[in-house]
Image (tube, rainbow, N blue to C red):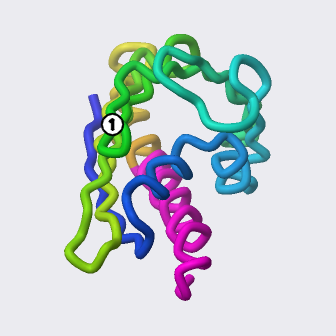
Amino acid sequence: MIQFHTETTIVAPPPEVFDAALDIGAHVASMSASEEAAVDGVTSGVIGLGETVTWRARHFGLWWTMTSRITAYEAPHSFTDEQVRGPFAQFRHVHRFQPRPDGGTQMSDDVTFVAPFGPLGRLAERLVLARYVRHLIASRNDWLRRHVDAPHGTG
């Protein structure tokens, strides 16, 4: 099992960042390098509690499909998405949005995942997947920070 935590400071207030993090179009734009697209479930707009989205994207030169459900939702403080079908044995992503004294947001991500295939999967987690998934989350957060900060005079 791989677990990691990231922190991203965003100038915009928590409700704005929360909504942007749930926006399907923002997600697609932030993951353009992997040609990610929403292909089933909620495919545009903002996804909500209990709803699913199926993503199709290219990683490691192969096409992958993953369906995620929003399993917890407390606007504008946190939400959780979890894989219900896809390449991982388990994938859970907890998003938190804390107000900052300057009116901005401290966004944090707690990601936990387990690769399939037992011992071979554990080896892949350590050698490749941990760094790769952390980089995907960091890239998405950087895109989100720049996109949401822009109307507030930064980014």
Task: Inspect the magenta stretch and tell me whether residue 29 lies in it.
Answer: no
Left/right placement of residue 83 relative to residue 108 reads: right
Tag 1 residue:
94
Please name whichever residue, 23 or 58, is drawn nearer the observer in this view of the structure.
23
Please name whichever residue, 154 or 101, is drawn nearer the observer in this view of the structure.
101
Compared with 8, 94 (above or below) is above
Circle 1: element type: strand
- Secondary structure, magenta segment, majority class: helix
Amino acid tagged 1: Val
Instruction: Give the magenta part as a residue range.
Output: 131-155
For the N terminus, the image quarter is: top left
Q: Residue at x 50, y 68 (%)?
A: 145
Q: Residue at x 49, y 49 (%)?
A: 132
| x and y, in percent, of residue 89 in the image | 43, 15
Please name whichever residue, 79 or 142, is drawn nearer the observer in this view of the structure.
79
Left/right placement of residue 123 relative to residue 4 reads: right
| x and y, in percent, of residue 20 in the image | 56, 52
Q: Residue at x 37, y 38 (%)?
A: 75
Left/right placement of residue 148 relative to residue 130 reads: right
For the C terminus, the image quarter is: bottom right
Q: Residue at x 35, y 24 (%)?
A: 72
Task: Inspect the magenta stretch and tell me whether residue 140 lies in it.
Answer: yes
